[in-house]
Every structure is written in structure tokens, then in C-alpha cells.
Image: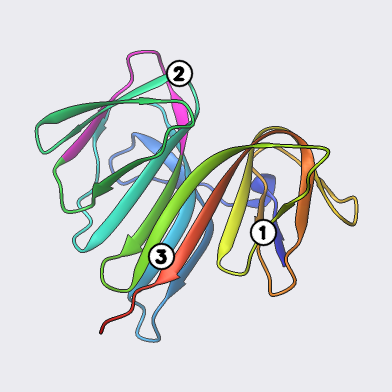
Amino acid sequence: MQLVRYQDLKAQRWQNGGGITRVIASASTDDGIPDWRISIAEVSKPGPFSALAGIDRIITLIDGEFLLLTVDGAEHGLEKYRPFRFSGDAETSAELPTGPGKDLNLMTRRGAFHGFVTVLELSKKRPHPVFEDQWVVLLQGSAQLQDETELQRFDAVQGAATPPELTGRGFIAVISLEASTTD
């Protein structure tokens, strides 16, 4: 198990100046080709997304009310906590009709990994396990691990062979990563 504190993550400015990103976790091949990346972006102004050839993306608005994405000419309204999947190859831009926000991003290299994001309500009565191929990000509310370690908003927990368990009140994003298999 690994605990990543949001407050400890280094902010990286986007090339276009439209926001900043904090990388929670990532993995690459031995030759440095990115396999997957989980990050939280602060979007402060509208504009184009960087093209990411061969990458599948899932974006989830986690702070703010609404984000309007245009992907290859089609508009998609993103509401809070509703994951949206699209290709990094697509020409993509964002509008911020209700102001700045934050989004959770999962990027996976096509053909190497499949990624999934699910937003769930956390319960004090029923512990939520974090399995080996998962990460969990606290989106809202309070949560603690079985050893009573308290999580703050946007802190992340990596799963393990013996799954850590979370309890609390609020919402979490469960990020699952599966290696692609070719038959």
C-alpha cells in the first residue's frame, strides 16, 4: 500500500499556460514510454488540450460544476463526478462556462493498459477495499484507513495484495488499471 498526499505533490505548469497538473502516480516501460498516468489538473482558463497520440483518456470533473469539452467537433458537457472517456488522438478543447475547476485524469497507453474510473459513495459501516490493480482518490468528505490514518481531500491510496480498506463519509474515485492481453 502507498499513500500519496495531495499537498506533497509538485505542481507542473501546462505548456499552454491554461492550468497546472499534479501527478499522483505513473508507470513507464524500461525505455521510458508512458504506460499510464493518474493526475489532478487545475483548469484556470479555456483552451486546447495537448494531442496525445496512442493514449486513451478518462477525465472526471472533481471540483467545479461544469466543463464543456469539444472532442473532434462534438460538444460534451461534463458534470461533477461523471467520468468521460475519449481518445488522446482527438482534437480536444475545453470551455469553462461556470468558472475554473479541477479534474482527475487517467491516461493509458492504447494496447498496453485499459483504465476505468468509478465514483462511489464511501460508507462508515462497510469498509471499501483497494485491490492491487487500483488506486482510490478521496474526492469529498472524510476517510480513514484501517490503521486510522486520516485522508485529506484528493489524497490517494494504492491498493496491495492485502487490500487496505477505507471507511468514512463522502465520495471516492476508484481507478482500476488492467494490463492488455493479446491473444
Q: Position of residue 37 (x, y in %)?
A: 44, 60
Contact (Cβ within 8 Å) of mark 2 with mark 3? no
How is the model colour-coded?
Answer: rainbow
Residue tagged 3:
36
**What label sits on residue 165 in the rendered view?**
none
| Residue name at image x 44 percent, y 68 percent | 178
Q: Tell me the quadrant of the picture where the C terminus can be found.
A: bottom left
Q: Earlier in the sequence, mark 2 or mark 1?
A: 2
Q: Position of residue 133 (x, y in %)?
A: 55, 67
Please say if 175 is above or below 71: below
- Which mark is nearer the camera, 2 or 1? 1
The magenta segment is: 92-103
Q: For the residue labelled by badge 2, is the local secondary structure a helix, a strand or a loop?
A: loop
Q: Earlier in the sequence, mark 2 or mark 3?
A: 3
**What label sits on residue 65 in the rendered view?**
2
**What label sits on residue 130 in the rendered view?**
1
Q: CA distance from mark 2 to mark 1?
A: 28 Å
